[in-house]
């Protein structure tokens, strides 16, 4: 029983059967149903069909996810895996903790699984060239780039938003609504990573608006998890009563911050506005709906895979793609009344 | 450069180095740091070290996730992957859509990747024996079992909560608070899967309480996603004004239901109580905090891997584990005033 038998039985081409078996969208519903019906009747087990047709080499791509539990990453893993499978490859999946070294983890996987390439999700922003040289396959940094490292641009690929610029936009949205006492909830001001870049955007927006940086409004949580964000927001509330808005550098942290404000008797947005960055599914169902900059998760995941495949299959060299976010105005930011700006 | 060189240089055993490289928790911080320091100095790239020591066979385990986007699954994938890696195996990861056939997908992966075993997450509850026979490796159904199928218990393994019984408990919690007009928000009453089992629990609890089933309070959403749950809740609100509580069969659906109630001018819990099942991280940060039955996600993931490894490594046959949930009383359920029971 081969894929050709299925194709003959269905009266379609072998590549159509392959597309159906790989869940490729470009097949009519009627054809898909007919093919699957025959597959079921004949008890056909596909032998990784797309590969049967076009490849004889190893076809594994590794995905190393650093910082488990980030709900935004979940929304990236989905399109990454789907795009890899549609191209006839399979995905070896590995999660590491924030303190672990993803280059070491990736290099180990490449060697033991003979991977063709790697995608890193949530990695460090400061790879040293000699460390990155551990990898002898192409790799793509998804959702970040080497902002704090010395890696040459032609030696790696990346697909990300412009963290610094987008953070600046988030704070500018608060400034436009009249806020001047704007707090920031972040992992760390000097993590040489996403948190530091977004902090730089926050500082830049304040500076452009002629506002001095107020260190007492900067709350570091040391991690990105919701419990830490909730605790950080409570510390801020206990310490200061004069801020009218909070920029949380990730949606999950923003949702936890809204909860902490609520539990401490402050209404969002009347008593305090909250803005995030990410656009995770859950943020559309918070009460109020979170105002946030939505990252194009589907496009970011798909593009990361496309860049990697272009290199694996010899069509292109390393590239760097910056994607824009889209501001969604929810109900968590309101215009400040003049008398609140003390 | 081998793992023995690292061990010699650090003055520890080879298995200690292996544990460090595989992120095994059972190593002191001091030893971990020393080993990683030497690994860095020597630019050592582990060749999947645990495997070097104990295995020469393929060491891949497949995880097939059906129904992408379920946030509860994210909390299961984490311990599954971690436990697999700690045991010296690697994870091949594949997601499929709700309408796809996970047995076919799993059988294809087993053949092409020479997998040692499979874990299915979110699969169907009604495998036919001849379909399951497509798999010639051990497999574990994680978070479900073969309630509606004819599969013999000795031919597969499962780790799950008792969906029917736990749904009954959720409804009983509402009954205890005086509610009698209790709606249910679910995928489908006859999906031969998780939704149908939890519906049976709902019906059983009502029946035991001497309450007739009111078909107008049963709202089917056809999918588990939050947008569908929100829309379903809105239909229910438009159709009926007399229910005082809702049992949503999953936390993500419950959070969306709370949002729909809020957007339609009904306060939770004063105007309508809401209870879920799952205990996803986000449900602790909804406003109000969701009352829910918390599934032991970590234990469920770890146990699934343990059962599979016991079979792969010849220590045990197929087994079935039922795990209990824990009721977390949030703020989304309140005691009904007598006059509200019309």
Image (cartoon, coloured by chain):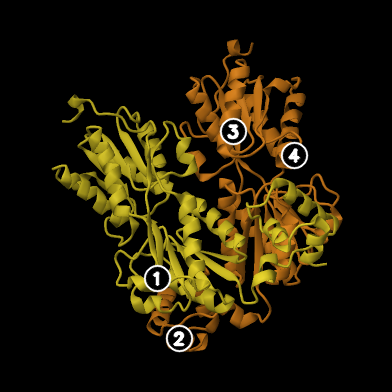
Chain colours: A yellow, B orange
* Distance in Å between CA atoms under marks 3 and 1: 42 Å
Q: What kind of element bears circle 1?
A: loop
Is label 4 in a helix, a strand or a loop? loop
Q: Chain of mark 2?
A: B
Mark 3 chain: B
Give the spatial CA distance, label 4 vs label 2.
Answer: 59 Å
Q: Chain of mark 1?
A: A
Quarter holding residue B94: bottom right
Name the quadrant of the C terminus of chain B.
Answer: top right
Marks 2/3: CA–CA distance: 58 Å
The alpha-carbon separation of the residues under discs 1 and 2 comes to 36 Å
The answer to whether B115 is drawn above or below residue B120 in the figure is below
Give the numbered dot on residue B162.
Answer: none
Few, some or many residues within 10 Å of mark 1 (<14, 14–19, 20+): many
Cβ atoms under marks 3 and 1 closer than 8 Å:
no
Where does residue B294 sit, x and y in percent of width and height?
A: 59, 42
Indicate which disc, 4 or 3, sits on the residue closer to the N terminus. Answer: 4
| Location of mark 2 (residue) | B11
Q: Quadrant of residue B137?
A: bottom right
Mark 2: give few (<14), some (14-19) or many (20+) Cα within 10 Å: some
Image marks 2 and 3: residues in contact by CB distance under 8 Å: no
Query: Which badge, 4 or 2, comes first in the chain's sequence?
Result: 2
Given this view, does label 1 or label 4 mark the residue nearer the observer?
A: 1
The residue sitting at 49% across, 56% down in the picture is A301
Mark 4 to mark 3: distance in Å? 16 Å
Q: Name the residue tied to disc 1.
A: A156
Asked if the residue at tag 3 contacts the one at tag 4, i.e. Cβ–Cβ closer than 8 Å, the answer is: no
Same chain shared by disc 4 and disc 3: yes
Q: Residues within 10 Å of mark 4 (few under 14, many from 20)?
A: some
Residue for badge 3:
B229
């Amino acid at each position: 029983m081969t894929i050709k038998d299925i194709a003959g039985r269905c009266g379609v081409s072998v590549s159509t059967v392959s597309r159906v078996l790989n869940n490729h969208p470009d097949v009519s519903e009627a054809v898909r149903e007919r093919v699957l019906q025959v597959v079921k009747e004949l008890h056909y087990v596909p032998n990784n069909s797309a590969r049967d047709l076009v490849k004889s080499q190893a076809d594994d791509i590794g995905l190393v996810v650093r910082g488990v539990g980030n709900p935004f990453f979940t929304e990236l893993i989905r399109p990454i895996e789907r795009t890899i499978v549609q191209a006839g490859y399979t995905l070896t999946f590995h999660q590491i903790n924030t303190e672990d070294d993803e280059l070491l983890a990736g290099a180990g996987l490449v060697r033991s699984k003979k991977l063709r390439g790697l995608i890193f999700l949530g990695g460090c922003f400061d790879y040293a060239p000699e460390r990155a040289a551990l990898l002898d396959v192409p790799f793509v940094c998804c959702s970040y780039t080497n902002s704090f490292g010395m890696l040459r641009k032609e030696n790696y690929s990346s697909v990300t938003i412009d963290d610094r610029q987008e953070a600046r936009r988030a704070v500018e949205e608060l400034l436009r609504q009249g806020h001047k006492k704007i707090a920031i909830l972040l992992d760390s001001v000097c993590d040489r990573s996403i948190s530091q870049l977004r902090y730089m955007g926050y500082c830049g927006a304040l500076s452009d608006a002629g506002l001095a940086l107020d260190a007492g409004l900067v709350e570091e949580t040391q991690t990105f998890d919701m419990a830490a964000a909730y605790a950080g927001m409570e510390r801020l509330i206990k310490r200061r009563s004069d801020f009218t808005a909070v920029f949380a550098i990730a949606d999950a942290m923003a949702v936890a911050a809204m909860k902490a404000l609520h539990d401490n008797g402050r209404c969002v947005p009347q008593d305090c506005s909250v803005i995030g960055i990410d656009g995770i599914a859950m943020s559309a169902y918070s009460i109020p709906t979170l105002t946030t900059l939505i990252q194009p998760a589907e496009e970011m995941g798909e593009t990361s895979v496309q860049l990697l495949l272009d290199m694996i299959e010899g069509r292109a060299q390393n590239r760097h793609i910056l994607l824009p976010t889209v501001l969604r105005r929810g109900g968590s930011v309101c215009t400040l009344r003049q008398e609140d700006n003390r």
